[in-house]
Image (cartoon, rainbow, N blue to C red):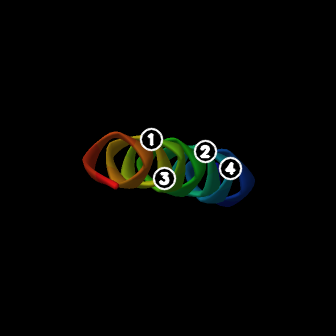
Amino acid sequence: MKNTSYYQLNLLGNVIGFVLSTTNRLYI
């Protein structure tokens, strides 16, 4: 269970980072 939640949190962080980089590219 712990590994699953950690994996989901890491995946969520990756998605957020991807979205942030995409928005930065759009605004620049």
State yes or no: discs 4 and 2 in contact (Cβ < 8 Å).
yes
Report the residue marked by disc 1: 22
How far apart marks 3 and 1 lie (CA) works out to: 4 Å
Rendered residue at 48%/53% (across/down): 21
Residue kind at label 4, given as amino acid type: Tyr
Q: Is residue 14 left or right of residue 21?
A: right
Q: Residue at x 33, y 40 (%)?
A: 26
Q: Secondary structure at mark 2?
A: helix
Q: Between tags 2 and 3, which lies in front?
A: 3
For marks 4 and 3, give the CA distance. Answer: 21 Å
Name the residue carrying label 2: 11
Q: Residues within 10 Å of mark 2 (few under 14, many from 20)?
A: few
Q: Nearer the viewer, residue 7 or 19?
A: 19
Q: Position of residue 5 (x, y in %)?
A: 56, 51
Find residue 7 and name its label.
Answer: 4
To which residue does mark 3 refer? 21
Q: CA distance from mark 2 to mark 3?
A: 15 Å
- Please, what is the three-letter code of the amino acid marked with disc 3? Ser
Give the SS element for disc 1.
helix
Question: Which one is in front, 24 or 9?
Answer: 24
**Residue 4 place in picture, x, y as percent:** 66, 45
What is the CA distance from the residue labelled 1 to the residue labelled 4? 22 Å
